Image (cartoon, rainbow, N blue to C red):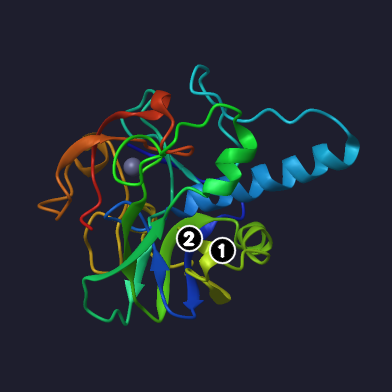
């Protein structure tokens, strides 16, 4: 495990001041590298649209290409198991939970009638594909979300500046970011900023090789998950150590 750090990259603390907190599906926070990669893809998409050229979305059948993020790389297991030097989000000043909100959805009968000329007499709201649903939405209620990383602070700042909301159900007002603050910490330990939360626990997915010789660190155990964006792509799944929360 070594860190490949390009010129100008230093340990960084990225802090998002939140209006109320963030909603998420996974038990751990949002990844900084995932956030940066999706911003780069959004920019590429907008440019393609403007130029009138086709934009290729991710496909489950092809191995996605790695975007060039303004972050250092950890070589991990020395093979395919490398990752970007950045953690997942860590909540600061958190209001202890659990906080769960529920949202419900039911099919629009009128819309179904307009879409189909052979609608059954009754589209059941209690069973089948078009049943109404009540879904839980776990929330993290906190003042700030904090990430640690090794990277190019100007480039990271530029990519994050237009991001006004993160996480799930953003259109319903969740995950509203009031401001971003990026601080350089040149004297900090680079390995630590590439892997650990401020409380010293594993702060991201990592191959076991990353933790060799680092003592008894708290992790979330072993599991199958991605090491770098797009995290949920099937080609990215690997045996990794999970973040401790
Ligand atoms: Zn690593």
Residues packed near mark 2 inside 10 Å, few (<14), some (14 to 19) or many (20 plus): some
Residue 143, relative to residue 199: is it above or below?
Answer: below
The answer to whether any part of residue 70 appears in the image is no
Q: Residue 232, image x and y in percent? A: 41, 36
- Secondary structure of the residue carrying tag 1 is helix
Q: Residue 45, image x and y in percent? A: 73, 41
The answer to whether any part of residue 140 appears in the image is yes
Q: Nearer the viewer, residue 232 or 74?
A: 232
Q: Residue 152, image x and y in percent? A: 60, 56
Residues packed near mark 1 inside 10 Å, few (<14), some (14 to 19) or many (20 plus): few
Q: Residue at x 16, y 44 (%)?
A: 213
- Indicate which disc residue 16 carries: none
Residue, far left: 216
Q: Residue at x 51, y 20 (%)?
A: 63
**Cβ of mark 2 under 8 A from ligand 1:** no
Residue 161, relative to residue 122: is it above or below?
Answer: below
Q: Residue at x 51, y 31 (%)?
A: 119
Q: Which quarter shows the C terminus?
A: bottom left
* 195 displayed left or right of 220: right
Residue 230, relative to residue 125: is it above or below?
Answer: above
Could you tell me how many numbered marks the image carries? 2
- Indicate which disc residue 171 carries: 1
Q: Which quadrant would residue 81 be assigned to in this image?
A: top left
Q: Which residue is mark 2?
A: 169
Q: Residue 110, image x and y in percent? A: 58, 48
* 16 displayed left or right of 123: right
Q: In the image, ligand 1 is in what quadrant?
A: top left
Rounded to the nearest whole Å, what is the CA distance between mark 1 and mark 2? 5 Å
């Amino acid at each position: 495990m070594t860190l490949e750090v390009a010129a100008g990259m230093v340990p960084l603390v990225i802090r998002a001041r939140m209006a109320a907190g963030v909603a998420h599906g996974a038990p751990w926070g949002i990844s900084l590298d995932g956030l940066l990669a999706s911003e780069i893809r959004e920019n590429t998409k907008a440019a393609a649209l403007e130029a009138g050229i086709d934009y290729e979305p991710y496909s489950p059948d092809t191995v996605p290409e790695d975007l060039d993020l303004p972050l250092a790389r950890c070589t991990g297991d020395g093979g395919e198991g490398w990752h970007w030097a950045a953690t997942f989000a860590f909540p600061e000043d958190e209001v202890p939970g659990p906080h769960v909100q529920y949202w419900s959805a039911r099919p629009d009968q009128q819309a179904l009638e307009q879409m189909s000329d052979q609608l059954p007499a009754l589209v059941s709201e209690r069973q089948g594909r078009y049943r109404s649903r009540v879904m839980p939405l776990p929330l993290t209620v906190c003042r700030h979300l904090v990430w640690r990383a090794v990277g190019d602070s100007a480039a990271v700042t530029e990519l994050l500046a237009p991001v006004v909301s993160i996480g799930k159900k953003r259109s319903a007002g969740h995950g509203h970011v009031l401001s971003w603050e990026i601080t350089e910490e040149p004297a900090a330990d680079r390995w630590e900023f590439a892997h650990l939360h401020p409380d010293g626990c594993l702060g991201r997915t990592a191959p076991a090789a990353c933790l060799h010789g680092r003592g008894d660190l708290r992790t979330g155990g072993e599991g199958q998950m991605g090491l770098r964006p797009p995290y949920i792509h099937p080609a990215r799944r690997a045996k990794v150590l999970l973040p401790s929360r």
